[in-house]
Image (cartoon, rainbow, N blue to C red):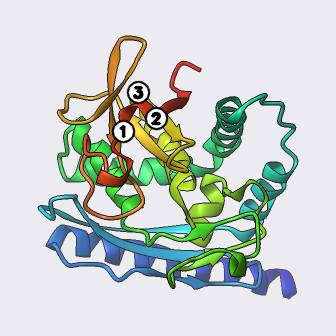
Amino acid sequence: MRKFLRVVGYFIAIFFILNILIQTIKKADTGERCSDGFDIINTGNDRLHTRGWNFVDQSRSFCGAYHSRGAVSDRLAKKRLAMNLRGDNYLEFWSEVYSNLVTDSKPDISFLVDSLATIADRNDLTRLELAELIVSFVQDIPYSFVVPEDCKEIQTDGRPCMGSVALGILSPYEFIHSLYGDCDTRAVLIYTMLEELDFDPMIVVSNEYAHAMLALKAPATGDYLLHQGEKYYFWETTAKGWPLGMLPPNTSNVNYWKTALAHEL
């Protein structure tokens, strides 16, 4: 009897999730803005997220929903904690961290990559618009500090903070589950998704600015970093509204930016 009730419970949960997904698709097709948030749906801290976001220029609106599992987030957190890092300097260290996070997370975020690609197909988006869909999806998530120390020890200006996090970064799956993400947490998630879709992204870092950012090889204009003779255009991901090729004024010295992770590395 318990097994029967458990099976029935699973079917009810699946029906509930599919119904919300169908409703969000309908909202996207009619241009209605989704509400942002999530519901914890069981004692395992599994979550059903709904997201609504716009292109950088506000020209198009999108809706989506996804299901994240607490057990997967916990498993990837343990892998992050168990990294055996050997980088000899700032750049090598973070290159190794980012590479490990990308490799470990790809199988578990493929569902989100597929979902966003489906939204792009349904809306007849170009390749560059697909990249913008992914970047703006992440830009829309409010910025949060992710730090290795206690949050009380830093100036947060009232913004959310997750403290006592080893390395001060979350894996892509931990980010989409918790919705806590700072600059490099965001850049690693976007890099992972774009690489899965055969784009040519980079993660760039600046020790001087204590900042990380995405860069993308794409037909664009504006601020770029040369890598192996090719132009990679900067893309700020920590707030809404930043277009491809525009560096924020307070991080505008291109000489302070270095490649931490590139598609061929």
Figure check: 54 above or below 4: above
Which residue: 37% across, 34% down?
A: 254
Q: Amino acid at mark 3?
A: Asp
Q: Nearest the camera: 59 or 95?
A: 95
Q: Nearest the camera: 229 or 130?
A: 229
- From the image, tell me which residue sits under label 1: 253
Relative image position of residue 265 (x, y in whole percent):
59, 20
Which residue: 25% across, 73% down?
A: 26
Badge 2 element: loop
Write down the quadrant of residue 86 in the picture: top right
Figure check: 253 above or below 77: above
Q: Amino acid at mark 2?
A: Trp
Closer to viewer: mark 2 or mark 1: 1
Residue 200 got which mark?
3
2 and 1 marks in contact (CB < 8 Å): yes
Per the model, the C-alpha gap separating discs 2 and 3 is: 18 Å
Q: Amino acid at mark 1?
A: Asn
Badge 3 element: loop
Residue 224 got which mark?
none
Q: Residue furthest left?
A: 59
Q: Is residue 237 left or right of residue 146?
A: left
Per the model, the C-alpha gap separating discs 3 and 1 is: 23 Å
Relative image position of residue 261 (x, y in whole percent):
56, 30
Mark closest to the chain's N terminus, 3 or 1: 3
Badge 1 element: loop
Task: Pick the quarter of the image with the N terminus.
Answer: bottom right
Write down the quadrant of residue 179 in the picture: bottom right
Residue 257 got which mark?
2
